[in-house]
Amino acid sequence: MKKYKFTYENSGVNINAAENFVKYIANLNKKKKSIINNNNIGSFASVTEIPKKLKKPLLVTSTDGVGTKIEIANKLKKFDTIGIDLVAMCVNDILVLGAKPILFLDYISIDKINLAKLKKIINGIKKGCEISGCSLVGGETAEMPGTYSKNKFDIAGFSLGIVESKKKLIKNKIKEHDIIMAVPSNGLHSNGYSMVRNILNKNCIDINKNKFLKKELLKPTKIYVKEILRLLEKKLIHGCAHITGGGLPGNLIRIIPNNICAKIFLNKIKVKPIFKWLKRKGVSDYQMLRTFNCGIGFCFVTKKKNIEEVKKYFSKEFAPYEIGQFIKNKKKKILFNEKIKW
């Protein structure tokens, strides 16, 4: 029998390991009752029915990753929460349009399949889907030797949500005198990590030896789906903004209609300890505000009379608070008053 020099395995790709991982995901999905058919796992594509209750449904899609937070996960060799981050970055964006997330797909690319690491990542993705009430219906795992250096990987997510046409949140629903409510983040979420890593490198900080940073830097992004969907059901929201890269100025501006302006009181922001730590390391107020969420992970717009009502739908840790209001102004979209109290 002729012996061949080249196989996929000696080229760096282990098909059997990939197949075992797919089986693991399929079994993982069978363990919990899912909203959507689980038979999609292992197929060429996933199939999902559009919910029948909606009269004029709109499909809302989002795709995202977690940026260089992955490098922190690699340094700490901790991979069980990065999947939650991935789901959060996608479903929180869908939420801004008033949509309910219904399904999620992931893409994992890695230098060499490491089942222990991949299982932790996918368990995090599964948990994120459970928190947000959507189903993990499929994905792709790509073993790419030569593209990634040893132990390196990347992940991306794709989510699909649905909203009744007349319930979609649009700019024009926001009016003068409406109040801007801030919902706290639980930390950095998944933005600004290139600056964080630069600070760590320049200060020669080993995060494995720093208890505070070890805890803070891999806190998973808060998923706001359950709370915000309740407010939408009660018709208490006129608009939303997911505070990610670009911070308050880069994200609030996306939802402001013509001829009105968001007047924000920066001194009302409840700053988390991790942001105070970054500020002390030499980051300007402007850079802090443009790069990080500074303690606000999500904003929603409501009427002043609803302020006490909306608070009932949140836990104490994520209780929303007023940071501004909309005023008439044709020249400016956002006005920042006062300064952040670091």
Image (cartoon, rainbow, N blue to C red):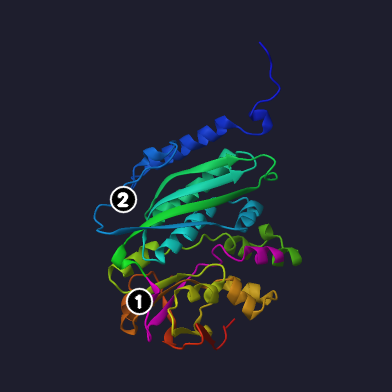
Which image quarter: residue 16? top right
Query: Is 58 on the left or on the right of 257, as rendered?
Result: left
Q: Are marks 2 and 1 in contact (CB under 8 Å)?
A: no
Q: Position of residue 64 (x, y in %)?
A: 52, 57
- Residue found at x 65% / y 47%: 152
- For the residue pair 36 and 33, the one nearer the viewer reads as 36
Query: Is 33 on the left or on the right of 206, as rendered?
Result: left
Q: Position of residue 256 (x, y in %)?
A: 45, 78
Tell me how many marks there are: 2
Span highlighted in magenta in the image:
170-198
Q: Which residue is mark 1?
A: 173
Which image quarter: residue 55? bottom left
Query: Is 24 on the left or on the right of 278, as rendered?
Result: left
Quarter of the image with the N terminus is: top right
Please tell me how crowded label 1 is: few (under 14), some (14-19), or many (20+) other residues with Cα within 10 Å.
some
Quarter of the image with the C terminus is: bottom right
Q: Is residue 279 above or below residue 259?
A: above
* SS type, badge 1: helix
Mark 2: which amino acid? Answer: Ile
Please tell me how crowded label 2 is: few (under 14), some (14-19), or many (20+) other residues with Cα within 10 Å.
few
Which mark, residue 50? 2
Q: Is residue 97 above or below residue 162?
A: below
- Residue found at x 67% / y 76%: 283
- For the residue pair 152 and 319, the one nearer the viewer reads as 152
